Image (spheres, rainbow, N blue to C red):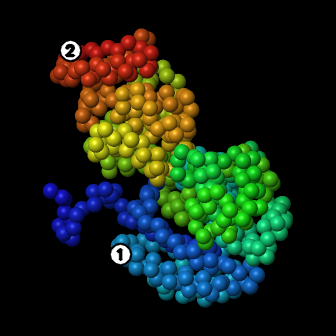
Amino acid sequence: MIRMNAAAETPFAQGRIQGVEPVAIVDIGSNSVRLVTYEGLTRAPTPTFNDKVMAALGKGVATTGKLNEEGVERALSALRRFKVLCSTMHIKDVRVLATAAARDASNGPAFLAEATKAMGAPIELLAGRREAELAAYGVMSGFYQPDGVVGDLGGGSLELNDVKGVRMGKGVSLRLGGLALMDLSGRSPKKAQKIVRKALADIPQLDKMKGRTFYAVGGTWRALAKLHMRQRDYPLNVMHGYVIPARDAADFAALVERVNADALANIASVSAARRPLLAYGAVVLEEIIRRAKPKEVVVSALGLREGLLYERLDPSARALDPLIESARELNLLRSRDPRHGEELCDWTDDLIRSSHLDETSGERRLRHAACLLADIGWRAHPDYRGEQSLNIIANAAFVGIDHPGRAYLALAASYRHMDGEDEVSPHIRTLASARMLDRAQVLGAATRVAYVLSAAMPDVLPRTPLLCSKSKVTLTLPLELADLASERVVSRMKHLARIIGREPEIKIAAN
């Protein structure tokens, strides 16, 4: 029987985290007006709805000083619709932000007054430095121990800020957004290059980037990265955490500058409204790389909206690991019993420790996430559980993890359902190192033993330790669970032992 909510007489949504209230952020940018709603104010907030209108409010602001009239109408229409959508989703916690276009235009105050009426909520007009601060918070929210410079490129401005762990510098805002550059240069990327080079010459934030990471935030840079990804036939479609070596990024940006956007390979993956801005985003990216000499460009799907959510968390919530929190949520929502995933972390801790396999703190973190995700595919047909688990994890909205780490998680979950002889996603495998491929196989083999012992239920693994000695890997069963020593357990123990180079053993402990 479907569980019903008695008050509303509707199906109870068990696939949602309970006890949190949804939040919404409306971002009135120079190029787009966007609504994003989130399941709740958590360390790893999951978007539940995302909609935008390419209003191009900032078109012409740099030269006329006024918001584009057609853009104003499109923006107000979008805000009225967003108000209805928030009401439909019963969201009371709605924050509305406005950025460079509304800040710089002479008719900005009049627009904001109309926008407040349309949205039915107060609007926070962000100063440039405040934009830089929120973008930095967004990168802190989305990356594990970030270290580099955040660049948030919008339609009207570019914000730069230094980040290292949970610390940030003083941000700066420059009128180098795509729409602004298009106007100021008279639609000439060559002239735009001179404008950008001059503006970046004395920016202190860029003096600190040599050999570090440049975190690229903003829709235009994501569009460039998507084209680069398609050019490489990259095995993932996840933008967050996509890495481009600095030299490669500069060469690709130079290509985009000189070629008509419609002639670029895979240009259909970029919206028509975004394409005219690609060359100007490429100019800014190339000049930043030339000026600051980072080692790599990393794409961030999280920016000022997620930065605002992160800022609102208390210090203890900020200190949580976003990857582990995301994995715990999926464990809660999709596993047969979430307590089993937590026990699996401890059970494999003892196995790895006794095996003397060298494991870094980062690898232990990934292993724990993999344990929490190990049972999320159980509703699929048994023949496809490995494939479904891999696809869910490879494409999940995780943050706090790079793409090689994501590949490890996906492969470990897939191996948990396979005997290890099958070829598992050759494309995903290319993202993981030989070491991480080996660790994924070890964990997959161990969890295969765990699940046939416990049927994915709690309170079994703590009583059935799996430990290594110099020559053996030994599973110890208490007398009352001795009947679990079946042919399937023996077979899976042999497979695990072969992978870690030991002999399998099953012992029955006397009470």
Mark 1 neighbour class, 10 Å CA radius: few under 14, some 14 to 19, many 20 or more:
few
Q: Where residue 342 appears, x then y in whole percent?
A: 35, 38
- Determine if residue 125 is in view: no
Tag 2 residue? 510
Q: In the displayed structure, would residue 169 be above or below residue 506? A: below
Residue in the foreground of this view, choosing between 82 and 344:
82
Q: In the displayed structure, would residue 43 be above or below residue 154? A: above
Tag 1 residue? 88
> Hey, what amino acid is under mark 2?
Ala
- Of the 4 image quadrants, the one containing the N terminus is bottom left
Residue in the foreground of this view, choosing between 385 and 138:
385
Q: Quadrant of residue 40?
A: bottom left
Residue depicted at 33% across the width and 58% down the height:
16
Q: Earlier in the sequence, mark 1 or mark 2?
A: 1
Residue depicted at 78% across the width and 67% down the height:
189
Residue depicted at 18% across the width and 69% down the height:
9
At mark 1, the secondary structure is: helix
